[in-house]
Amino acid sequence: MSTKLSKDFTIVVAGQAGQGIESVASVLAHILKKQGFHTYVAKDVMSRVRGGMNSIMLRVSNHRSDAYCEKIDLFVPLDPRAYEHYSKRFTKDTIYLGVDDPENGEGKKKRDVIAVNFLQIAHDVGNRIFANTIAAGAILGVLGTDQEVGTHYLRSFFQRKGEDIVEKNITAFNQGFTIGEHASFQEDIVVTLTPKNDVEDYVFLSGAEAIGFGALAGGCNFISSYPMSPATGILTFLAQNGKECGVLVEQATDEIGAINMTIGASYAGARGIVTTSGGGFDLMTEAVSLSAIIETPIVVHIAQRPGPATGLPTRTGQEDLALARHGGHGEFARAIFTPGTPDQMYELTAHALDLADKYQIPVFILTDQLMMDSLYCVPHSALSKKNVQHYVEKTDETYKRYLLTDDGISPRGIPGHGNGLVHADSDEHTEDGRITEDMEFLRKEMVEKRLFKRKEHLMSCALAPDVSGNKKGSTLIVCWGSNKGVVEEAVSLSKNPDLKVAHFTQVYPLHKSVAGMLGSAHKVIVVENNATGQFADILEVETGEVVHERLGKWNGEPFSVEELTATFKK
């Protein structure tokens, strides 16, 4: 076998839940980063505590490539049964590194195999738990990386567990590395990828951590949520860092309590966020409407997964856009942001908190399972410090919470900050916050005041889509959220000169340029992970333009670079 890997290569580590494939991926990712390689990590996990077949993909390159690939360059199964689950993604050059030689019915090898029994070697070292470290060493040996960098990382990583654990892991790693290095020489595997010096100083962030850091940067000081995958990571992150960063964290008994507690904290002057998934947000919609009528800001993060009901709880999708757009009865202003990179997750979370406070409205951030559970290699410069601005006023005896103003924004007071009385009433109310049924004047004025925020403020500050590809191309590929990287890369690889890409980080309300952009395109194709084309619907309703093709995927898997490249070549 002679294999040459260049530009980028994809490693897939597979095994049953509980076998520690995440440990292998974490060690690999950090060591590869330290050696100057961009590394993107994506998970494929079954909804089981133990058993089932899971995998983690590491895409390693000398440039940033945060997109999912079907191809597997190096396959490492910790369980031999993983082969049948992932062999459809093999290419003629796929390297198989692991237990047992997979054979077909005629007794011939399906692939050239580097046979390594990780469990047996781990047993010889002292315990089967070292199989993960041996696997990591073998992979890095195959790739021809610097062994010393790996041992140094392991020493610092396991230091807190004592010297005995450190030495056994280093022994296991070195044995694996020797096996991989020898196999690489024997099988003539050549890796020509060139590292970059600046990557070593980058930071690894999951999508959940990027949202969490963005919340802190935006001045968040309160979160109440009920755990629900794939959104729980944000609650966990803020709980771990809350004391140091001044965030009050409350795990509620259910989603209804979570959002109402966050609204209550906001009424008292906090800057709050709640995180959930689609099923949890179903329970929150009445409170979203409450937030709107009492003009108390709140930010709701929805980490999407396939439904209906429990659906596929550990898979990815973009099925909750319509829910976020219409959730909550009545008519009122809202904004919906859909970041596509960790940089955008950070920036838009901070922006959402500011926007909600400034205009006293509910604001939504939509991500998905792929984004939440992936690991990204991010430069420190992407996490710039934010200047948090507050919009609370000191009240006096003449204060009116819902004062009708020329700009539609009533002065926001909070209890105890001044001498005024801060009313909050979920019924329609007067300017000072008392219940009213004045349908001739006040009801009409209050509804128009709340909607005025959308027309005059939210639309004027809406974010324009990011345009890439051939900006003069006549075919416009539209995407939103997590599909940014994969669509842009596929368009580039397709070498189709007619294509340009518009990635939306804000899907409602739309930027004023969108109608003209759609209208000037000969053909508009919207790519999204749902069956009905939910964003395509918004585009047509809001602009009056036609979407010519809806390219959807709704089986719980992300779009891959390969499948979109093939489509765009047409």
Image: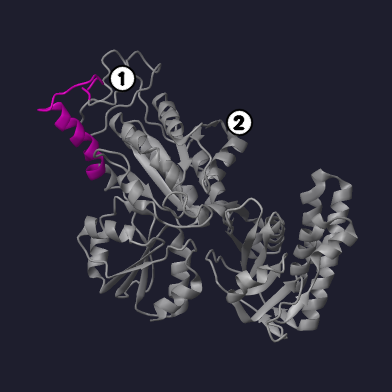
Left of 522 or right of it: where is 440? left
Please state which amino acid type lies under the numbered disc 2.
Lys
Against 47, residue 243 (above or below) is above
Contact check, label 2 and label 1, Cβ < 8 Å: no
Q: Is residue 343 magenta?
A: no
Residue farthest along the front direction in this orientation: 105
Q: Quadrant of the N terminus?
A: bottom right
Residue farthest along the left direction in this orientation: 440
Q: Which residues are magenta?
A: 429-456
**5 or 111: nearer the eye?**
111
Q: Position of residue 17 (x, y in %)?
A: 67, 56
Q: Secondary structure at mark 1?
A: loop
Res. 423 mark: 1
Query: For mark 2, what is the residue?
Result: 243
Q: Position of residue 529 (x, y in %)?
A: 41, 61
Residues packed near mark 1 inside 10 Å, few (<14), some (14 to 19) or many (20 plus) = some
Res. 198 mark: none
Left of 441 or right of it: where is 285? right
**250 or 365: nearer the eye?**
250
Q: Position of residue 9 (x, y in %)?
A: 63, 73
**81 or 199: nearer the eye?**
81
